[in-house]
Amino acid sequence: MTERLYYTDSSLSRFEARVVSLSGEAVTLDRSAFYPASGGQLCDTGWLEATGSRLRVKEVTEDEHTGEVLHVVEDPEALQPGSVVRGEIDAERRLDHMQQHTGQHVLSAAFEKLYGFETVSFHMGDESCTIDLATEAVSAQQLAAAETLANQIIAEDRPIEIRFATPDEARTLGVRKIPPAERDKLRLIDVRDFDLNACGGTHVRSTGQIGCILLRKTEKVRQGVRVEFVCGLRAVRTARRDFETLTEAATVFTTHIWEVPQQARKSLDEIKAAHKAQQRLLEEVAELQAQQMLQSALERGGHKATLDTYGGSLREEVGGHKLVVQFFPERDLSFIKMLAQKLTRAGTVVALMGCGGPQPSLIFAQTSGLPHDMGALMKETVQRMGTRGGGNRDLAQGGAPNPARAEQALREAASAL
Ligand SMILES: [Zn+2]
């Protein structure tokens, strides 16, 4: 069984060992300081050196059945069973992991001491870490209080020691969480006068090395509340990024970063109000335009209706009602729909409308009771264009591939009536 050197010394980053066996890329050593991925903590990476070659250790896992530490090595051909290797751990990565993981011990203890919230799981990611607390909810005040207590413990730079005890001894010592697995000896991590917990991971020597703890978002999960956090240099990077993001937002609003939420809310309110005002104006424009169109249709033929944008292609009289056809290159669907509805309500009218813009569309509408079928006319029209559309006898809408095609389709539909 691999002797786990990190068990008694988490700061050891260089060691010598003998190759026990090789299986594909997986190398087993008689002793190793490499931490294998387990217990929510990411694995170490690093290098193995042997006879002049330096091999990258890209992953370290634990064999489920034998419990051996497996070093996944790039190009392991240089190694043979029995050969002596020098191992070197990526110390920066290890320190980061120790900061996150030890920070988790302190944070979990803080939540438990303050509110009795038990930590039921821990996850370490490349960017941030999470713990799941067995509780229905965590308030913003509770988060802030746990963060403050955890950072006080860090500032006090309390020693962290490794102790070994039997499960029975551990129970009398008041260990926070005793693992269910049957073991003769438990490895206990002792944060002096603050937390004692069974754990097989790697930890810093004193709380000061954690640097700091920054709590992030919370999220409701099946087993409770998930709390995201970052420690040490990750916390500094995260805070720096937050600040830069806020500064950028503040520049957009020409304000101080603390005023960004108020400014954002104010801008949203203004946008909503402007949108409402625009809608009211468009209604008025549509109303006026409808009246003008009807009037000019009357003036034109006396009894027959055409706004003859398309000149001679329109027949002038269609069974005792007016035909109004118009294309609006600058308007959108909601406007032409509003206009068509106003036209068909104000008179006895068939209104064929089209618009350009980013979403070229057509609206066919008739005053209720007229004999045409707008839905059928739209179906034929969109079929020719290969687009989608439809509706009922009195009102139908459809899309067009581009403004020019929409305008042409409008003319064709008018001639088909
Ligand atoms: Zn631990």
Image (cartoon, grey):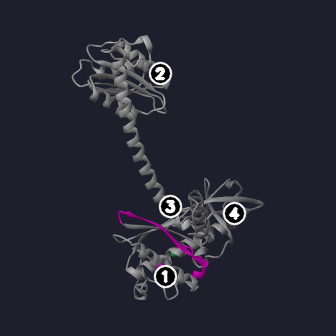
Three-letter residue code for mark 4: Leu
The mark lying in front, picked from 2 and 3, is 3
Residue shown at the point (45%, 29%) measured from the top left: 360
Three-letter residue code for mark 1: Leu
Residue with the mark numbered 1: 149
Residue with the mark numbered 4: 48
Mark 2 or mark 3: whose residue is earlier in sequence: 3
Mark 2 or mark 1: whose residue is earlier in sequence: 1
Residue shown at the point (31%, 31%) measured from the top left: 342
At mark 2, the secondary structure is helix
Q: Residues within 10 Å of mark 3 (few under 14, many from 20)?
A: some
Three-letter residue code for mark 2: Arg
Residues marked 2 and 1 touching at CB (< 8 Å): no
Location of residue 153 with respect to 408 vertically, above or below = below
User: Which is nearer the eye, 98 or 65?
Assistant: 98
Residue shown at the point (73%, 62%) measured from the top left: 50
CA gap between label 3 and label 4 equals 56 Å
Q: Where, quadrant-wise, is the C terminus in this rendering?
A: top left
Residue with the mark numbered 2: 405
Residue with the mark numbered 3: 263
At mark 1, the secondary structure is helix
Residues marked 3 and 1 touching at CB (< 8 Å): no
Mark 4 or mark 1: whose residue is earlier in sequence: 4
User: Which is nearer the eye, 340 or 235?
Assistant: 340
Mark 3 or mark 4: whose residue is earlier in sequence: 4
Give the residues drawn in magenta, as a range: 197-223
Mark 4 or mark 2: whose residue is earlier in sequence: 4
